Image: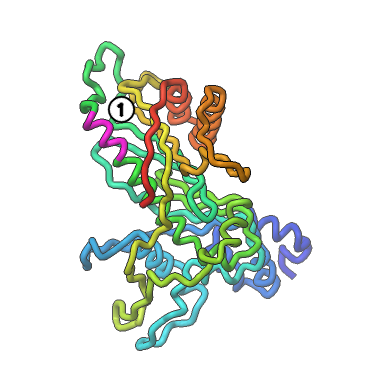
């Protein structure tokens, strides 16, 4: 008899849900038959990617975000749930990672996947944070960024702090927006097999350890995704190739097409402040907040002829909803303080075609 024998299954399962880390839970399965049975019932999981294999030995342009994600999962977790592969076999069993790793769990309801770093390449001192919500397609995306953060007295902040000129500043903000949308759509694309196989999922989050970007799919978004047959078809823009170090047939991704969900035509509400003081006497240069929504969200869908929301009351209501969305994404800390200041400023509307 061990110390866990007197503990009821429901309490042990609660402990496993608090542990949540997939790698730890997979190791717990080998402790005993009881643990093996209970671990598979855990419904709140966190799948961490500890390390990304850098592409120093390959052409950097040929490697993509999906490749580094899959290879890191392979390196850290696949060996825990499978036998050593035959050295000459092409491993089609690797195709659905991380979906394959999660097949040992029967009823996942809440799943978070954490990547080791973000995707955006920014200029020195700049920072961009984003949060995107998806169903079968993009529902909304909130993007916050700044060019520089400096702790100084007001008298020590130069008049041109954060200034790059109107044209250059607008171009930079548009580049931030497009980069965030591309990163979000690539992450959403990776989740298709997980959503397909984990039919009890009610919340799915894919984020990175640096806190740069987060993709969220709630219960309604997951149901919408599953009800679209096109989303659940096997992708033909990704394939598996054999090879790898030591002739071990280590599978990896080879991207043929875009490897991301198309971004629909969107409307951008952009707010920008040249210099913004935040808590602790710090100053943000070029603070920017962008709310992105599909263009279709501005049109009626009640069966009547589409009409743009042109009334002043509708515009004010839309701005209030945008403010709520922004505060939900960045409601705490210094970023939340900056967002609360930015939502009070004048916004500018832009439209972007699908890509």
Q: Pick the quarter of the image with the N terminus.
A: bottom right
Quick check: can you spot residue 266?
yes
- Which residue, given by chain and number where applicable, does mark 1 sit on? 286
Q: Which residues are magenta?
A: 167-174
The residue shown at (48%, 57%) is 48
Quick check: can you spot residue 331?
no
Measured from the top left, where is residue 231 in percent x and y? 51, 64
The residue nearer to you, when weighing 223 against 48, is: 223
The residue nearer to you, when weighing 324 against 40, is: 324
SS state under label 1: strand
Measured from the top left, where is residue 334 in percent x and y? 44, 28
The residue nearer to you, when weighing 269 against 46, is: 269
**Which residue is most to the top?**
155
Which coloring applies here? rainbow
Is 53 located above or below residue 265 in the figure?
Answer: below
Left or right: residue 29 versus residue 117 is right
The residue shown at (30%, 26%) is 285
Q: Is residue 168 magenta?
A: yes
Q: Is residue 158 magenta?
A: no
Left or right: residue 143 versus residue 6 is left
Q: Main secondary structure of the magenta part?
A: helix
Is 116 located above or below residue 98 in the figure?
Answer: above
Measured from the top left, where is residue 131 in percent x and y? 46, 43
């Amino acid at each position: 008899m061990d110390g866990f024998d007197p503990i009821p299954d429901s309490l042990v399962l609660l402990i496993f849900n608090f542990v949540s880390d997939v790698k730890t839970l997979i190791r717990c399965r080998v402790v005993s038959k009881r643990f093996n049975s209970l671990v598979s019932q855990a419904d709140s999981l966190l799948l961490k990617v500890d390390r990304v294999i850098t592409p120093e030995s390959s052409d950097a342009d040929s490697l993509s975000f999906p490749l580094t994600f899959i290879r890191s999962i392979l390196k850290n977790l696949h060996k825990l749930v499978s036998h050593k592969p035959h050295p000459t076999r092409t491993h089609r069993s690797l195709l659905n990672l991380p979906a394959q790793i999660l097949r040992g769990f029967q009823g996942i309801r809440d799943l978070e996947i954490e990547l080791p770093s973000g995707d955006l390449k920014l200029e020195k001192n700049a920072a961009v944070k984003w949060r995107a919500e998806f169903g079968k397609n993009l529902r909304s995306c909130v993007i916050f960024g700044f060019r520089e953060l400096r702790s100084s007295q007001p008298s020590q902040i130069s008049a041109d702090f954060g200034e790059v000129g109107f044209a250059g500043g607008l171009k930079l903000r548009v580049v931030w927006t497009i980069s965030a949308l591309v990163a979000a759509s690539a992450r959403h694309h990776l989740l298709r097999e997980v959503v397909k196989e984990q039919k009890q999922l009610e919340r799915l989050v894919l984020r990175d350890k640096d806190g740069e970007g987060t993709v969220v799919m709630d219960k309604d978004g997951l149901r919408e995704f599953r009800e679209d047959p096109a989303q659940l078809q096997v992708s033909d823009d990704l394939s598996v190739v054999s090879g790898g170090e030591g002739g071990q047939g280590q599978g990896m991704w080879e991207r043929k097409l875009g490897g991301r969900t198309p971004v629909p035509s969107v409307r951008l509400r952009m707010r920008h402040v040249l210099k913004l003081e935040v808590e602790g006497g710090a100053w943000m240069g070029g603070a920017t907040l962008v709310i992105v929504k599909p263009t279709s969200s501005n049109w009626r869908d009640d069966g009547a002829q589409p009409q743009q929301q042109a009334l002043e009351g509708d515009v004010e209501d839309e701005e209030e909803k945008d403010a709520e969305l922004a505060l939900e994404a960045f409601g705490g800390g210094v970023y939340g303080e900056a967002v609360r200041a930015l939502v009070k400023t004048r916004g500018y509307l832009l439209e972007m075609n699908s890509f």
